[in-house]
Image: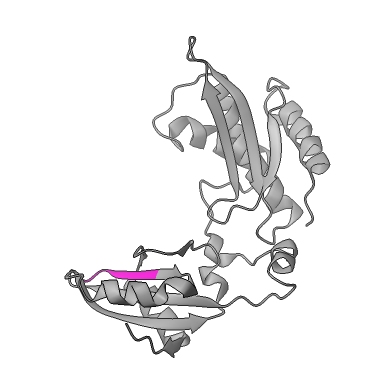
Amino acid sequence: MALTLDILRQWFWQFNREYFAGELPEPRLYLSRARTRLGNMSFRRGRFTGRPTDFAIGISTCYQLTQKECQEVLIHEMIHYFIAYRRIADTSSHGRMFRSIMQHINSRYGWNITVSCRQSSLRPSESECAASGGSSTRRYTVLALELKNGKCMLSVVSPKSVTRIEKLLHGVGAVASHAWYATDDDFFFMYPKVRSLRAIRVDRDVYEAKTAAMTPLSVKP
């Protein structure tokens, strides 16, 4: 759906009344183009009091989400907001208190709020396609690495940095083998486009499936 700030604000007050007894002041609400997270709740601590202040909730418009999915992302962030605003101690960011509130809202009101979401299973939104030239097809230059300890790594590399990184690889003793690929698989949409030798670890079955489906590239140092 096409999410707007007005819609986000309406939802905030609706859920605030229904699930948080209207207790939460309206935070700064904003839309982002974040690829690595669907939502974010942030705040500052008062310089002298240490109390949380300047709360903000952002929702990413990078992915194609249904209205219900957008609402679940917002409620997820509102749970974080409630815990921080009330200064409730929790065991971790998604600790016992967070999960208790989340499970209560899910079971009582029929939501499917989760601790995390795999962005790799989502499709880029129409606004992201327009920003990239109006096409839903993106081209990724992927570096696949197998390390001597058996770990598998994948990285999306800026095309301008490919030759330089290829030269660097020959001096890295931990790398057992590497290969370059081109693909339009939006599995890689959430990956940052790097200009240095950085990669994300993946399971071997994912590594083998992705490298088998991509087009090999010949890169000379």
Residue at (49, 21) in percent of width and height: 88
The secondary structure making up most of the magenta span is: strand
Does residue 60 appear in the picture of this structure?
A: yes
Q: Where's residue 206, x and y in %?
A: 40, 74
Q: Colour scheme in the image?
A: one colour
Which residue is pictured at 46% across the width and 38% down the height?
94
Residue drawn at the location 47% of the way across and 85% of the way down: 214
Task: Say which quadrant the N terminus sits in.
Answer: bottom right
Residue occupying image coordinates x 74% and y 67%:
130
- Residue 170 location, x and y as percent? 23, 76
Quadrant position of residue 149 = bottom left
Horizontal arrangement in the rendering, residue 171 relative to residue 92 (left or right): left
Q: Is residue 105 visible?
A: no
Q: Compared to 1, does 186 lie above or below?
A: below
Q: Is residue 120 magenta?
A: no
- Magenta residues span 150-154
Would you place residue 215 above or below residue 20 in this image? below
